Amino acid sequence: MPFKFISNSERFLKIIFGVSLFVVLVMGGVAYRYIKELSNSINDVQHNYQVHIELEKMLSALKDAESGKRGFIISQDSTFLLPLLSSNQQIENSLEELKKLTLKDPQQQENIAELKEKIDKSLAIFEKTLQLSIANNPDSREFIAGFREGRQTMNSVRFKINEMTAHENDVLGLAKEKSVRRLSNAPMLLYYVLILSLLILLLTYLQISKNLKVLKVKNELLETFKKSTTQSEVISKHGNWIWHVEEDVYEYSDNLFRLLGEEPQSFEPNLENYLSFVHPDDVEKLSEHVSQMIEHEDLPFIHYRIIQKNGSIKHFKAYAKILVDADGYKRLLGTTADITDEIENYRLIEKRNLELERSNKELSSFNYVASHDLQEPLRKIQTFLSRLEDKEKDNLSNSGKLYIERIKASSSRMRSLIDDLLQFSRTNKSEEALEDSNINILIEAAKTDLAEIIADKKARIIVDDIPSMRAIPFQIKQLFLNLLSNSLKYSRENTSPFITVSYSKTNASDVPKVSHTKYNVFHTITIMDKGIGFDQDYAEKIFVLFNRLHNKNEYSGTGIGLSICKKIVENHNGYIIAKGEVGVGATFTIYLPIT
């Protein structure tokens, strides 16, 4: 989530940066626009000024020509004609300049054409009156008429020039009004744009400040994680390394150097230096794996040995996986672990397995001895007691007969003990494979073995229909044989035993005293009797080997039967729970997993 936040913040900052850049460009464009308009306004004023200058020059030249003509007429002095000669050229130059200056103004072009006609006419009249004056005929009607016409023409020239000047003033006024209107809005617009830019910059600053705080927290977390990772490497005896694929450069963590028996970063991390630590017998194998890693950019689990400088041989296991970032940059992230302890433990387990195998063989030998060598002298004892009782019974005293009975009881108990021990040792065996078993048939087989006792005690045994399940048939039969025998043995006097065997299914969460199991549902078989029962405080002790709640003189038995039951149930990954109440009865509940 934090990385996503930072990513969104980066995107947000990019957007803000883009908006800020756009605003700056807009401000630049607006400023350029108004500067351009201001420059155009200055150019318009300068242009108008030049038109005025040329018009004034033209009008001045005409005035000079008219003054020279009048001075000559009055004084007949030819020096007064000099301005007239120079003004003609000045007028022509001014007209040409005005044409250039007003090329984009059609109205002024028309005015210039009219002005030129009037000027030409005025100059022609100047020339006519000048010739009459030279002919000494200034009083003639023709001269007076020409003089008056010249004055009228001159006035029309002045009017036209004034008209052109007024037109230029109007054009300049409109341009000025337009420029003033535009330029008057410029400061306010620039002010608003500046305020907006400052707000955007402030928002960007706040976001950057917020991101810096987040990055600071993340850096602290990363630093903590780095230290934790370093500690984890030391504790778990592993080191990390990175291969930068494009640059063909390696990085080793500090603990990887320690695993090699070296100080952190004590040599350049590369393949050549690393292979110098590898066991000579494993160099070729590891080199081949590295070549495949370089070719396929992948490294599956590999095992090899290294030799530290102190001569210690360590077993290593390495694994690596390629990582490609958003820019397509490839890195191979690897982990190398020291599994020397695991190898040594594995060898120790193998050794102990061999010892266990020898113990099992010795136990098998004990079973053979118990079933043959121990029972053989016991059978002889019982045989000789039988013969002694048959042939010498009448010759024995009462004490002798009592001793014989005690010897018979002890030998019988000895046989039962040997048989039960053999039975318990068989339940320790796990060679028997689970198979689909009809539990109802196995219960009936157990009842058949107990048929004589059932008949003697007139017992009633009610059994539910139990589905088939995966089990070891021989052990399951022995389980029910022991439990039913236990219920028959501890029945109340002068009361026919009543035993029920019921079936149900139980979820793992409802199985008492079970917190963790890989099974979800269990077969539940309950054996309930109405015998003498037992104190609930002894519910766990009755499953302990050789543990008895009653004196051997009260009830026969060796204290092994319920231990056998518990062992059989555990062989099936199940649980057995006892519940009793003195004088009421006992209940044994068996939970066998449904597989």
Image (spheres, rainbow, N blue to C red):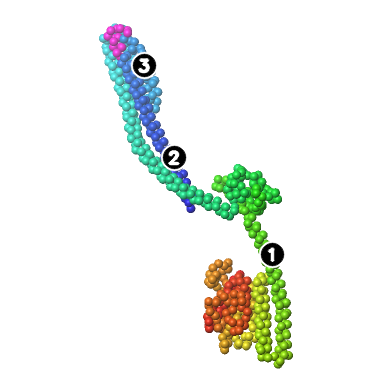
Helix, strand, or loop for circle 3? helix
Q: What is the secondary structure assignment of the residue under circle 1?
A: helix
Q: Is residue 116 visible?
A: yes
List the residue tagged with mark 1: 354
Alpha-carbon span between mark 2 and mark 1: 79 Å
Q: Nearer the viewer, residue 119 or 29?
A: 29
| Residue for point 31% across, 9% down | 80
Tell me the amino acid under the disc marked 3: Gln
Q: Indicate whether 506 appears above or below 289.
A: below
* Image coordinates for residue 474, horizontal then vertical, percent: 66, 76
Say whether marks 1 and 3 touch (CB < 8 Å): no
Q: Position of residue 139 (x, y in %)?
A: 26, 9
CB-based contact (under 8 Å), mark 3 and mark 2: no
* Residue named by callout 2: 21
Helix, strand or loop at label 2? It is helix
Q: Decide if residue 300 is in sight here.
A: no
Viewer-nearest of discs 3 and 2: 2
Q: Quadrant of the C terminus?
A: bottom right
Instruction: Name the amino acid type tagged 2.
Output: Leu
104 left or right, relative to 525: left
Please tell me the numbered disc located at residue 90. 3
Is residue 585 depicted above or below 521 in this figure? below
Q: Position of residue 460 (x, y in %)?
A: 59, 85
The residue sitting at 35% across, 12% down in the picture is 85
Q: Nearer the viewer, mark 1 or mark 3?
A: 1
Q: Residue at x 37, y 19 (%)?
A: 94
Q: Picture coordinates of residue 221 (x, y %)?
A: 49, 51
Q: What is the span of residues highlighted in magenta in the rendered image?
A: 66-79
Residues packed near mark 3 inside 10 Å, few (<14), some (14 to 19) or many (20 plus):
some
* Label 1 crowd bin: few (<14), some (14–19), many (20+), radius 10 Å: few
Which residue occupies the foreground of this view, 86 or 226? 226
